Amino acid sequence: MSFDLSVWALADGATPEDVRAAVQQCRSGRHHERQPDPRCVAFYRAITARYPDQPAGPSTPWAVAPLHKAADHIELNLDPACPDQVLLDIERLAGEHRLMLFDAQDGSVYPPPGVRLPG
């Protein structure tokens, strides 16, 4: 079993409900045909520079590799035994690239630091 997170490049002002709706669209196989969001591209390059997904070596934190990439999100399926530092790096990079973080285990949505979610 893996620990699943995804990072989302949605429009400013997106709500947790918007993120959850986008997750459902992805899970049903509906992806928008468009150029990848530069925030996702930068996040992917940064996270895989530290934790390569192609090829995934024996010490990889990834339970599924390569990572699932779409125009507006990156899905990260982590080995449950991965070091806590991996999660801290994901959170930090998501914030640096202004991406919303979705926790698939409980449906929580975390905005980038300094961004307030609509009440």
Image (tube, grey):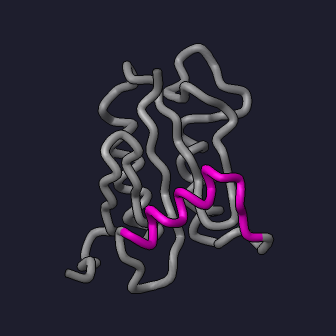
Whether 97 is drawn above or below 64: the answer is: below
Between 39 and 78, the one lying in front of the other is: 78
Q: Percent position (x, y) of residue 114?
A: 25, 76
Whether 52 is drawn above or below 109: the answer is: above
Disc count in the image? Answer: 0
Looking at this rendering, what residue extends furthest in the front direction? 28
Q: Residue at x 59, y 44 (%)?
A: 49
Between 112 and 85, the one lying in front of the other is: 112
Q: Residue at x 65, y 34 (%)?
A: 53
Q: Percent position (x, y) of residue 113?
A: 27, 69
Would you say 57 lies left or right of 96 here?
right
* Quadrant showing the C terminus: bottom left
Between 21 and 14, the one lying in front of the other is: 21
Whether 56 is drawn above or below 100: the answer is: above
Q: Residue at x 45, y 38 (%)?
A: 4
Instruction: Specify the quadrant of the image occupied by residue 39.
Output: bottom right
Q: Percent position (x, y) of residue 84?
A: 30, 32
Between 29 and 72, the one lying in front of the other is: 29
Would you say 81 lies left or right of 78 here?
left
Q: Main secondary structure of the magenta part?
A: helix
Q: Percent position (x, y) of residue 81?
A: 37, 19
Range drawn in magenta: 17-32
Q: Residue at x 49, y 51 (%)?
A: 6
Looking at this rendering, what residue extends furthest in the top direction? 58
